[in-house]
Structure formats: structure tokens, C-alpha cells
Image (cartoon, rainbow, N blue to C red):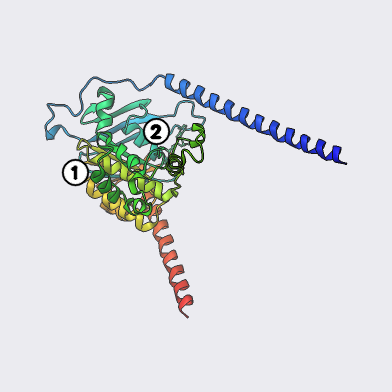
């Protein structure tokens, strides 16, 4: 019996060792694949060619700041399998300093417009113009310096919460006062206050105390400090959006921003958080060209100088809220569906409150 027991113990120990070996081998092969992808990505040539015109043009006076124009633009994503292109014969203008809001159903081309205006892609036909010149004429680095974008795709990095905000203006990544102001603007101040280390809280430490082979007794203090540093900090989807928004407000501090593009950055925010974010963006961006993509109608569309209502890759309608409501077309029907849903939810809330009280 004892021989069988020993044999069984050895067998399960061998089984465990083999499992660990394969697990480690799996991790090593994943790391190698990741590194390979990293090198391959770094080698991908940018298809967006650089221009040579300085932006903003030194000679440009205010009369030359004409804003942005999309002129008869069509665009299909490289390798797109869809039968229809993402954008077809799209034309509209956003005067300098105006607030434009792009609305429309899923897949109607809203985000694609932002990608062309920020020159992530070039149009297949037609022209995107900035201050009357084709966008491709300008130096890319100059254009990027004057743009602040806020989208759902923005990521947090394995740095401190403060550094994640400070990256919006990398020369001031250590400027605590500026970071705190940006945090307040982005609605992230309460989040920073939640942690004992505040803005210095490490989001996702990359060090590992195990790697140093530290002695429990001899390196006790160092181990405690490293342990604290290494403890990853979790943030919710809404908190991430607030931090990323704060980074955009930090970017405004560069004083160079001329275009603010905001692509549905608030899906995980509660209605109050979203309202406050849009209001602060609108106030901070005052005087700059602002382009918002949103699914939620309401105060933003009412403030818009121009609303572009997209449908299946084309501009269905454009104008102010008042003009489009008077048209009683695509925009009005989208608006009314939301207004109805809002009224229904208000009724449901009132009913629930009534029954809770009685
Ligand atoms: N990277 C991509 N590669 C290929 N096709 C894409 C890519 N991004 C978007 N598309 C396609 O282009 C079309 C327009 O997409 P876009 O993201 O601009 O729409 P949208 O109006 O912003 O949608 P949503 O409201 O869902 O965000 C869609 O048919 C979409 O499938």
C-alpha cells in the first residue's frame, strides 16, 4: 500500500511539474510572438505621406482661418469587405471656431469622418481642406500638435494616474498643479482622491519583487515598498474615461490646440458625468473648431452651429437643430425616438418612486 501511495504521490508531482513546464513554455512562446508583432508593427510604413507646409501658416491672418472642409469625399477602409464604402460623396464645411455635431445610426460613417479630419487616413477621392489648403499639404507633426482628440479607443498606460493625465502635455508630466486642474476638468479629481497615494498611485506596475530574489528578513523594507508599488490598481470603465478626458484637458494647456474632436467618449459615464464632461469640453474649447460625434441628442445638438446627420455613409441632412427639426426628416425622427425614450424612462421612474413611497 505504501509503495502505491508513494508512486501515486510521485506521479501527481510529475504531472504538476509537467503542467507548470508547459504553462511556462506557453507564456514564453506568447512573449516571443508579442515581441515579433511589436517589431513587425514598427516596420509598417505609414501610407499617409508628409506635407511640407507649416501649420498654422506663419503668414496666416484670421481671415485665412477658414476652418475645415470635406469636399465630395469617398473612402473605403483598406481591405474592407463591405459592399458599400464607409463614406460616399460626403461634403460639408465647419467654419473655424464652430461647434459641429455628427449624428447618425451605427456604421453610418461618423467616426470615419473624424479619422479623415485628423488625417489618420487619406480620402480615396475628393479633398479634405484645412484653412483652404488640402490637409495633405501640411506637415503631419504640425497638424497633430494642434489637435486634441478624445475617443473610446484611448488607453491607460502602466504609469501613475497623474502621469496618465500628464501625458497630454508631456513637457509638464510632473506638474502636479496642472495635472490636478486637468483632473478636475475631466471629472477625475474624486477618483484621484480615492487613493491614499492620489495622483502618484501606480496603475499597473511592471516591476516584480520576485525577480530580485529578495530575502524576507534582510530586504523586508524594500520588499514592502516594492509590494506596494506592484499592487495593480483597478479602475472602472467610467473612471478610465474620466482619466482619458483629463488627459485631453491637459493637452489644451499646450495652448496650440485648434481642433478638438470628440468621438463618443462617454458611453460608460452616468448621465450627470456625461453632461458635465460635454459642458466643460464646450467651454474649454470655446473659440476652437470642435467636432463631436454622439449618439445621444440633447443639449449638445442644441448648441451646435452645424449638425451633420449621416446615413449609410452619406450626409442625409445638415443644418442647425431648429432647421433639421423643421425638415422633419432623418434627424427629426432620430431625435423624436430619443425624446420618447427619455419621456418613457421619466414615467417609469415616476411610477417606481410613487410605489416606493406608498
Ligand atoms: N478599421 C476599419 N476597417 C474596415 N472597416 C471599418 C473600419 N472601421 C469602420 N469600418 C466600417 O466603416 C463603416 C463606417 O464605420 P464608422 O465607424 O465610421 O461608423 P459610425 O457611424 O461611427 O458607427 P458607430 O455609431 O457604430 O460608432 C462601417 O461599415 C464599418 O464597418
Local crowd size for mark 1, using a 10 Å CA cut-off: few (<14), some (14–19), many (≥20): some
In this orientation, which residue lies closer to the viewer: 173 or 300?
A: 173
Q: Position of residue 275 (x, y in %)?
A: 32, 55
Q: Can residue 221 be seen in this view?
A: yes
Q: Where is residue 305 in the image (x, y as percent from the top left)?
A: 24, 47
In this orientation, which residue lies closer to the viewer: 348 or 281?
A: 281
Q: Where is residue 71 in the image (x, y as percent from the top left)?
A: 29, 31
SS class of the residue under badge 2? strand
Farthest residue, direction front: 218
Residue at numbered disc 1: 287
Residue in the image at 30% along x and 27% along y: 127
Farthest residue, direction right: 1
Residue at numbered disc 2: 88
Local crowd size for mark 2, using a 10 Å CA cut-off: few (<14), some (14–19), many (≥20): many
Mark 2 or 1: the one toward you: 1
Q: Do the residues labelled 2 and 1 touch (CB within 8 Å)?
A: no
Residue in the image at 34% along x and 36% along y: 114
Left or right, 337 with respect to 140, comes to right
SS class of the residue under badge 1? loop
Q: Position of residue 105 (x, y in %)?
A: 43, 46
Residue in the image at 44% along x and 31% along y: 85
| Ligand 1 lies under 8 Å from the Cβ of mark 2 | no
Residue in the image at 88% along x and 41% along y: 1
Q: Is residue 293 visible?
A: no
Residue 166, compared with residue 33, is above or below; it is: below
Left or right, 103 with respect to 54, comes to right
Q: Earlier in the sequence, mark 2 or mark 1?
A: 2
Ligand 1 - quadrant of the structure image: top left
In this orientation, which residue lies closer to the viewer: 354 or 19?
A: 19
Quote the CA–CA distance across marks 2 and 1.
30 Å
Left or right, 108 with respect to 70, comes to right
Quadrant in which residue 124 is drawn: top left
Amino acid at each position: 500500500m505504501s509503495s502505491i501511495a508513494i508512486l501515486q504521490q510521485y506521479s501527481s508531482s510529475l504531472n504538476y511539474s509537467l503542467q507548470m513546464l508547459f504553462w511556462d513554455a506557453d507564456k514564453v512562446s506568447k512573449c516571443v510572438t508579442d515581441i515579433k508583432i511589436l517589431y513587425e508593427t514598427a516596420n509598417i510604413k505609414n501610407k499617409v505621406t508628409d506635407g511640407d507646409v507649416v501649420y498654422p501658416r506663419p503668414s496666416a491672418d484670421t481671415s485665412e482661418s477658414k476652418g475645415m472642409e470635406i469636399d465630395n469625399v469617398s473612402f473605403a477602409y483598406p481591405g474592407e469587405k463591405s459592399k458599400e464604402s464607409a463614406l460616399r460623396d460626403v461634403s460639408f464645411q465647419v467654419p473655424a471656431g464652430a461647434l459641429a455635431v455628427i449624428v447618425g445610426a451605427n456604421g453610418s460613417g461618423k467616426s470615419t469622418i473624424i479619422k479623415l479630419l485628423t488625417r489618420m487616413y487619406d480620402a480615396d477621392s475628393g479633398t479634405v481642406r484645412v484653412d483652404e489648403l488640402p490637409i495633405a499639404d501640411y506637415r503631419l507633426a504640425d497638424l497633430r500638435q494642434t489637435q486634441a482628440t478624445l475617443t473610446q479607443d484611448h488607453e491607460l498606460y502602466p504609469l501613475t494616474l497623474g502621469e496618465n493625465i500628464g501625458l497630454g502635455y508631456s513637457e509638464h508630466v510632473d506638474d502636479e498643479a496642472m495635472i490636478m486642474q486637468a483632473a478636475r476638468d475631466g471629472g477625475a479629481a474624486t477618483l484621484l482622491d480615492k487613493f491614499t497615494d492620489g495622483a502618484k498611485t501606480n496603475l499597473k506596475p511592471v516591476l516584480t519583487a520576485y525577480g530580485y530574489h529578495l530575502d524576507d528578513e534582510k530586504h523586508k523594507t524594500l520588499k514592502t515598498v516594492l509590494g506596494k508599488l506592484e499592487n495593480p490598481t483597478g479602475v472602472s470603465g467610467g473612471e478610465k474615461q474620466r482619466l482619458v478626458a483629463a488627459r485631453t484637458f491637459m493637452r489644451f494647456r499646450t495652448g496650440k490646440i485648434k481642433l478638438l474632436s470628440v468621438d463618443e467618449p462617454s458611453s460608460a459615464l452616468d448621465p450627470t458625468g456625461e453632461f458635465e464632461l460635454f459642458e466643460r469640453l464646450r467651454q474649454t474649447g470655446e473659440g476652437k473648431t470642435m467636432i463631436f460625434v454622439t449618439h445621444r441628442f440633447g443639449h449638445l445638438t442644441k448648441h451646435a452651429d452645424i449638425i451633420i446627420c449621416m446615413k449609410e455613409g452619406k450626409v442625409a441632412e445638415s443644418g442647425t437643430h431648429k432647421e433639421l427639426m423643421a425638415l422633419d426628416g432623418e434627424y427629426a425622427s432620430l431625435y423624436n425616438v430619443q425624446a420618447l425614450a427619455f419621456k418613457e424612462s421619466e414615467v417609469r421612474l415616476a411610477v417606481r418612486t410613487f410605489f416606493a413611497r406608498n
